[in-house]
Amino acid sequence: MGTSVQVTPLSGVYGENPLCYLVAIDGFNLLMDCGWNDLFDPSLLQPLSRVAKSIDAVLISHPDILHLGALPYARKHFGLSAPVYATEPVYRLGLLTMYDHYLSRRQISDFDMFTLDDIDAAFQNVIRLKYSQNYHLSENGEGIVIAPHVAGHLLGGTIWKITKDGEDVVYAVDFNHRKERHLNGTVLESFVRPAVLITDAYNALNNQVYKRQRDQEFIDAILRVLRADGTVLLPVDTAGRVLELILILEQYWAQQHLSFPIFFLTNVASSTVEYVKSFLEWMSDSIAKSFEHTRDNAFLLKYVTLIINKSDLENYAGVPKVVLTSMASLEVGFSHDIFVELATDAKNIVLFTERGQFGTLARMLQVDPPPKAVKVTMSKRVPLVGDELKAYEEEQEKIKKEEAVKKASIVKVEEVRATSSHLSESTKGDSMVIDPASATASPKGSSHFRGQMDILIDGFTPPSTSVAPTFPFFENTAEWDDFGEVINPDDYVIQEEDSNHMVVNGKSLDVKPDEASVHLLLDSTPSKVVSHELTVQVKCALLYMDFEGRSDGRSVKSIISHVAPLKLVLVHGSAEATEHLKMHCAKHVCPHVYAPQIEETIDVTSDLCAYKVQLSEKLMSNVLFRKMVENEISWMDSVAEKTNEKVLTLLPPPSALPTHKSVLVGDLKLADFKQYLSTKGVQVEFAGGALKCGEHITVRKISDSSQKGGTGPQQIVIEGPLCEDYYKIRGHLYSQFYLL
Amino acid sequence: MASVVTGAQNKRPNPNSTSAAATREGDQLIITPLGAGNEVGRSCVYMSYKGKTVLFDCGIHPAYSGVAALPYFDEIDPSTIDVLLITHFHLDHAASLPYFLEKTNFRGRVFMTHSTKAIYRLLLSDYVKVSKVSVEDMLYDENDIVRSMDKIEVIDFHQTLEVNGIRFWCYTAGHVLGAAMFMVDIAGVRVLYTGDYSREEDRHLRAAEVPQFTPDICIIESTYGVQLHQPRPVREKRFTDVIHSTISQGGRVLIPAFALGRAQELLLILDEYWENHPELHNIPIYYASPLAKRCMAVYQTYINAMNDRIRTQFANSNPFDFKHISPLKSIENFDDVGPSVVMASPSGLQSGLSRQLFDKWCADKKNACVIPGYVVEGTLAKTIINEPKEVTLMNGLVAPLNMQVHYISFSAHADCAQTCGFLKELMPPHIVLVHGEANEMGRLKQKLVSQFADSNTKLYTPKNCQSVTMHFSSEKMAKVIGKLAEKVPETGESVSGLLVKKGFTYQIMAPDDLRVFSQLSTANVTQRITVPYTGAFEVIKYRLKQIYESVESPPVEETEVPTLIVHERVTIRHESDTYVVMQWSADPISDMVSDSVVAMILNIGREGPKVTPIEEKTQEEMERMARKVVHSLMVSLFGDTKFGEDGRLVITVDADVARLDIKSGEVECENQGLRERIKTAFGRMQGAIRPIPKP
């Protein structure tokens, strides 16, 4: 009986690899997160590629690469077409994060894992939910209800509760129980006894310092450097933890009236903050409150300057400043470049606020002791000049000629197969040929282009079965505004006029509502990537402070034992941390703790029996409930009766049934009991784990280690010599319970 | 069958009644409008079911002032209300909230959406400031509003919350920014309260959603009755045409509009129109509302509550950052030199800036007044729609009304077609109409009755304080879980366990499972008590055997010390020469047994070991004893009684002589009566002195 639940990790167990898990509930396949790492290593996605097609829904929990980075790639290459569920901020900030990563990659390499269009396509079918919204899945998933709840780690961050037939499966990774400046703490603790809890062991071995002390140290470290004329580099994520850091800095700068400039540099910095401003309802109560009372939007930044171009920093070359910039891994992007510039000067500091991903430059720098020198690859996209430009132009010319030939052939084919759809097809063909998106300008571009041309030709050899010629169809997602379809002016440029117009630098020219990409798009000269390796002497200070916003090991343990799941699945965390938490939970939380390997399917179907009955009115009128906290409870004796095939009704018993063994209901805390007794005038003290009441009576609780997870009743012993006190204290003890 | 009953308080379950009483009358669901019943204004609808109480909206009537403007709060006991839900920030839906929170004994929880709460604060502060009434008539002041802010909790669209077993969530209503329709679920009965809603998407708001689930009851607004709105493009064109032609003739345009809600929509229309007509760029547009200016930040922030169109625009520039419209502080700052367009509040022209401008401009026929929305009965705006010849100015003088008056409704209330369509999709079995004037409501009711003629839909149009009562027979279903559910019982088999009720869900489980399925836990209390005793342990055993059927003594090898177990409950161990230890698990019967054992042991101690075993008597002696007893008893009953020679008893009563054979019980006597009496007496004696015959 019960709902069948299977969990299969696809990535991110016994290690810090991206998160991606398959949860099958009665045959409905839910993909929990779809992460990738900053290096975009396709080998990590192997397990996903094998199951991507069978997935029915994707649930995303956080807007960062580790949780959603593989969405565009999986959609493009693995045929992952299931609807994606996420909260509004996860959708929006996740999209910006993907743009930022793409643009950073693109700047230094011919990155072709996915394009901006793929990102857009992947995010197009995201269904956006609100916190605590119970969303009823339909079709195959009939009966399954999914609900996002506050996770606390990132803005919009989600712990997912999946319910079927009253059984809860809770997926909670990267949660934070502490309230922060911009986020509320997680509500995970309000879930009690879910059938399955899937959580991470990432922080099981870490314990955090006191928050206020950490904040002060953080500010001190920054100010020390600034006052010594140094520059502080904070490699951060695109739109996640950086928000908290910005608020800390803003707040401190405002308090102390500091004038050191702060820059927030990502490819999408201004859009990020603009959107974040409109996500107040997702943030902490205090931010919401301050807006309600004074209409002060916390993200109306006064001290932090948003820039999307590294060149904007040049004016501040020698000035002490704080730079928050994306790509926490330091692998690519602005942070990489700025690091190389800063590293050689001992005045500067690189302040890490999160652990670097495995195998990245950031991780290398975080080891203790830090390396003296690191090898880095500097890559730059430079415009083509001289011979190269000439060669490129010639090549383009050649392509153009070929194109013309192709075009002629298109026309020919069309003439031959003149159909009613002639017109539309020819226009389609035309726009395709001059579609700048397909023309890549890098030195490799020509061959790339040729590949597409091949496809074009393929398209024109219609399969024998087809009735009409099929064209390779590139879906242009048309955007509409009040004036009709948004057009791309470049589509209408006459090619022969100026070859430069056609030769673009390989960026998608789709109109994006993101002005961040615009500066790259405007730059339309042919370019290439130049790389050279160099060794950077790391002289600047390196510091790591934990601003990851995850619950620490101790809290994780106490939260898990409070939630007390019937079955627990541990994922994401080093092998050591996973084992540690597994041992701990098996001892203190529940006997069923699993930590599966990649692609190992574990069955966590609950062995719970249940059936439904109808309570007859007659029976209920005899029941006298007692109220306990949120519950009302009563003993009930009844006789079952099958009224029809399905419904089982409970009726009052015809005659008195034999008395049942009485049950004491209640939760006795010795400390509370002590307090209670002292208010009743009994002398009471703790002695050797037992409560000594009066002169002779002791009350103690027996913690039975064989009772795993404390699922059995509590064992309480009261002992003492026969005396009046004994009966008095026993009376007090009884008053702590309900007798049923 | 539901009925309309006057007097809500009679039907309301007594708050003091026990929960048992509440379950008995619990199937009755009561809806009572405390305001907005057959009227527009002071929306407030009371609902009660199964001892749970919800209040929807808490408005004031804009045409009245002071306590008279409040809904009929005295019909209910505010302390019994569990949840108060506010649909949107308009005064007729939210303005009595500070009063209700601060001046009554209401102790429940209040919810509204984020944007509603942000605007509520600004709007009511403004309302307190501008309403120029005497101090006694002031319902509350600024401090009350600030205090009320701390009590108001926020809910996001679609977010499901649960309070005291009442589950509720809200849908987009499309009326103003943050307007919500609330769905309340109490024990499986769903009630939808639409508040003000509009099914038409406009420039910045989404249309009202159609809920996923059909409610059992739909409480719906009926403001526009059977009227139909013109299509939006037509209305917009009329609006811009009127304004364009007026200003091109050198006239001024007054738009009396409420500061928030429709005003933002109209400003979006005007800004766009000016953008497209460069020839108008020298004509100023003013919105004379500092309040609207203050609320702009809210509009700029909560774009996620608006439609996709605004959100797309937002990516480029803020659509609420108007290019051709400037704010106007007061009439003193207004340089009235030529054609202009002024949007001013209040919408009803009762007082304030809109009235000042109206008084100034009403006599000139070049000018125009465009009334852009619903106007409440009893206001000047309502009067001038009928275009009277003259109007009374604020200073009491009468002036001719020459300015043109246009009524172009941009009101974001549903019209008849929208209401019918909405209800047709939902098909609720019960429909309650509120928020509409009696006539309009009546017409709408007729229309709906004919529309739903062939379905089983019931329609109600209660007046204020008239209760609508409906009955829902809810079947209580429980889930048997855990060990108790391992086997599904057949008819006649018993099911016994703990019945745990949380909210409106029931679970039945074995006591051992309580900890597994709920936050509750069970406990075993082991009691161990030492009782002083110096005598022989055997004596205790012997005494116990006299009292209890089951006294067992397990072999000493197993227990180390001599041990007795009484009724498998209480264990007595002879641990030392000076005391015995008793141990048992607490429960009423064991406690009783243990108490008696303790009492017995203490008694042994007190009496000392003077117990003498009774000698076994022979059959013969017993017989002799019996004869003696019978003889003496017969003497006491009948007097002269002797033993005869044959061993029989000779009883002489007056003249009659009877002979009784003690062994067989035969009686020989001529007097029938005496013989029977002796026989009966002897039978009783036998019963008393002889052991009970073994069966």
Image: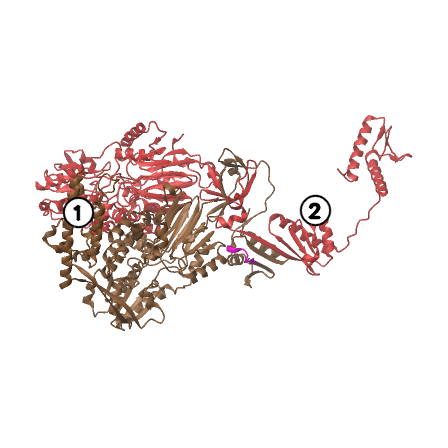
Highlighted range, magenta: A700-709
Quadrant (top left/top right/bottom left/bottom right) for the C terminus of chain B: top right
Say whether residue A669 is left or right of residue A13.
right
The chain letter for the residue carrying disc 2 is B
User: Which hue belongs to chain A?
Assistant: brown
- Residue B181 x/y as whole percent: 32, 41
Is B646 contained in the magenta span? no
Q: Which residue is mark 1?
A: A431
Residue type, numbered disc 2: Glu
Say whether residue B470 is left or right of residue B422.
right
Asked if one can make out residue A296 in the rendered structure from this viewpoint, the answer is no
Q: Which residue is mark 2?
A: B549
Asked if one can make out residue B219 in the rendered structure from this viewpoint, the answer is yes
The chain letter for the residue carrying disc 1 is A
Nearer to us in this view, B222 or A483: A483
Q: Is residue A461 above or below residue B668?
A: below
- Residue A64 x/y as whole percent: 31, 56
User: Could you say which quadrant of the image residue A322 lies in?
Assistant: bottom left
Determine crowd level at label 1: few under 14, some 14-19, many 20+ residues with C-alpha closer than 10 A. Answer: few
Q: Secondary structure at mark 1?
A: helix
User: Could you say which quadrant of the image residue B236 lies in?
Assistant: top left
Q: How far apart in space, not on screen, are marks 1 and 2 (Cα)?
A: 102 Å
Nearer to us in this view, A70 or A654: A70
User: Which hue belongs to chain B?
Assistant: red
Nearer to us in this view, B68 or A87: A87
Q: Secondary structure at mark 2?
A: loop
